[in-house]
Amino acid sequence: MKILTIIGARPQFIKAAVLSRLIMNDPETEEILVHTGQHYDENMSEIFFEEMDIPKPQYNLNIHSKLHGEMTGKMMTEIEQVALKEKPDWILVYGDTNSTMAGALVASKLHIKLAHVEAGLRSFNNKMPEEINRIITDRLSDILFCPTDYAVENLKKEGFENFKDKKIIRTGDIMLDASMFYSKKQISFNKEVPKDFILCTVHRAENTDSTEKLRTIFKSLNEVGEKVKIVLPLHPRTKSKLEDITSDYKAEYPNIIFLEPLGYLEMIWCLNNCRFVITDSGGLQKEAYFFKKMCLTLRNETEWRELVDNGYNILSEINENDILNNAFKIFDRKETFDKELYGDGKSGDFILQQLKK
């Protein structure tokens, strides 16, 4: 069996690492990795392949820094050529990026079976590009690998059970597999990081493209940091936006320790050692839970509703009062993290066996 795997962004590298490691040890299966180039910063891309001991992609398309339409179109053109050359049995996509949707569209046009890992997630916010990518990819997929009960329920509500040629399979979350495996390899890395800190990431376009929201977020973070310092690996997009609104963001927000983007093993160390997490990322909400940390999410909605429903995640409006009130609530929260929301950490094995069927 030959699998053509499409990846392009940090979370996809981590998820793909789980299956790639299993496929390398499976003599019946061959994987061709295609990196679209969507994340092209060395610290956000190349370092992941080195840290995770997985093969470098056989194809690197170097498509980045373009508007959504142009980026997706160029990806489709290049992925199509690779697919025609390699003739895979499956095209495998992860998550919800432009790379995901481009791979899905190519699979559909060439009549190649499509598998979507992390199917069924919905934020119910169609202004998010990721939401559109998810919906289209799910509709085109032959196997929908759902990480949660909510994801399965979303697909049922959308009528996917009526499509007899599709399989909806609950797998658990492949990110849990990665967290369990790579936590043994975590890297302690930076003397600037204090013993007690809050881990934070901010990168989502809806937050960074609005000057008002960006100022509100960082003013609020700086105030929270008066109690416990904020450690913030700075996404290239966020760094550029901060430089547009202030001449010296480090001086303006002294309670935030700004770092260069971190590798996955360094992020795992931060997750293991932080007080709690503040983020607008989708994946980091779950990773906080995997490492038994509360999370404050700087968004009005989340794809990971089970975290909110069980009290492990608090959603926040982007205004100073809401962010501060919610952050200070978390300081006093004690959770047991005793519920198994995302499976048993063996999703990768299960997914590979389902593909081989």
Image: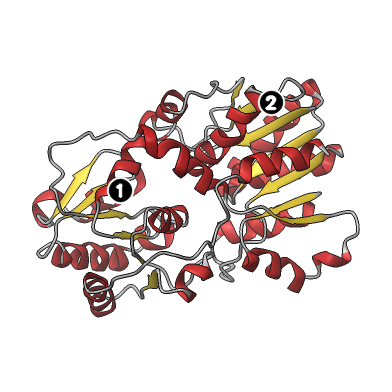
From the viewer's perspective, is 11 left or right of 265? right
Q: Is residue 335 left or right of residue 105?
A: left
Measure how far apart labels 2 and 1 are at the Cα level. 32 Å
Identify residue type, mark 2. Glu
Residue 280 image-quadrant placement: bottom left
Q: Amino acid at mark 1?
A: Asn
**Residue appearing at x 28%, y 55% in the figure:** 200
Where is residue 306? Give x, y as percent. Answer: 52, 69
Query: For this rendering, which residue is in front, 326 or 69?
Result: 326
The residue where tag 2 is placed is 31
Under tag 2, what secondary structure? strand
| In front: label 2 or label 1 | 1
Q: Does residue 143 sit above or below 208 in this rendering?
A: above
Q: Secondary structure at mark 1?
A: helix
The residue to which callout 1 is attached is 272
Number of marks drawn: 2
The label shown at residue 351 is none
Occupied quadrant, residue 126: bottom right
Q: Is residue 32 left or right of residue 208?
A: right
The local crowd at label 2, few if under 14, some if 14 to 19, many if 20 or more residues have their Cα within 10 Å, is many
